[in-house]
């Protein structure tokens, strides 16, 4: 019996994307006072999932090719487009913007977990364990 359900794969992908996005956001917040630091974000899930489905996602051929194997190896990191001016030291991290992005990533993660939970509930009912 093949339980490789696409809905679970999609939910897993969304969960991984949200975790990767939180990691990039945490790095932005940690560098909020670093002169010249430019805020980053990862591509939206719809683009990242489309790349993975088409088989064109980024892959490292050697471990040292990416800065953070947990995020950059799976998702394309790009400059974040934040509203507002950059600080006099060249840093463009907006803590308010990063908070909003963090909440959005948290909501995506909760959505993915909810989909997984309900899918597993349906499977349990199907085999008569509930």
Image (tube, grey):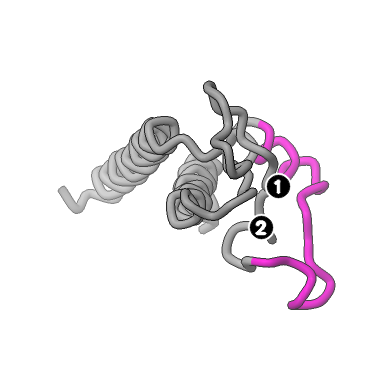
Where does the image place residue 83, in percent across and percent down from the top left?
53, 22
Q: Does the magenta stretch include residue 54?
A: yes
Determine which residue is flagged by label 2.
72
> Residue 72: where, in percent of width, then height?
66, 57
Q: In this view, does 91 lie to the left or right of 74?
A: left
Is residue 5 something that shows in the picture? no
Using the image, determine if residue 84 lies above or below residue 90. above
Q: Is mark 1 on a helix, strand or loop?
A: loop
Secondary element under disc 2, as helix, strand or loop, is: loop
Label 2–label 1 contact, CB within 8 A: yes
Residue placed under numbered mark 1 in the picture: 76
Residue at horizontal 67 percent and vertical 47 percent from the top: 77
Looking at the rendering, the stretch of residues picked out in magenta corresponds to 47-67
Residue 30 visible here:
yes
Q: So how many labels did they put on this image?
A: 2
Furthest-bottom residue in this view: 63
Residue at image position (30%, 43%) is 126
Determine whether, in the image, residue 6 is placed left or right of residue 54. Answer: left
Height in image: 65 above or below 34?
Answer: below
């Amino acid at each position: 019996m093949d339980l490789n359900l696409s809905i679970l794969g999609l939910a897993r992908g969304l969960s991984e994307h949200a975790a990767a996005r939180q990691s990039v956001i945490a790095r932005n917040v940690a560098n909020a006072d670093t002169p010249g630091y430019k805020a980053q974000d990862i591509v939206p899930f719809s683009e990242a999932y489309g790349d993975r489905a088409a088989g064109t996602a980024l892959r490292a051929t050697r471990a040292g090719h990416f800065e953070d194997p947990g995020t950059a190896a799976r998702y394309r990191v790009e400059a974040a487009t934040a509203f507002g001016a950059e600080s006099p030291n060249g840093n463009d991290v907006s803590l308010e913007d990063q908070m909003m992005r963090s909440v959005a990533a948290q909501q995506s993660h909760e959505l993915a977990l909810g989909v997984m939970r309900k899918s597993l509930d349906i499977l349990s009912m199907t085999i008569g364990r509930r």
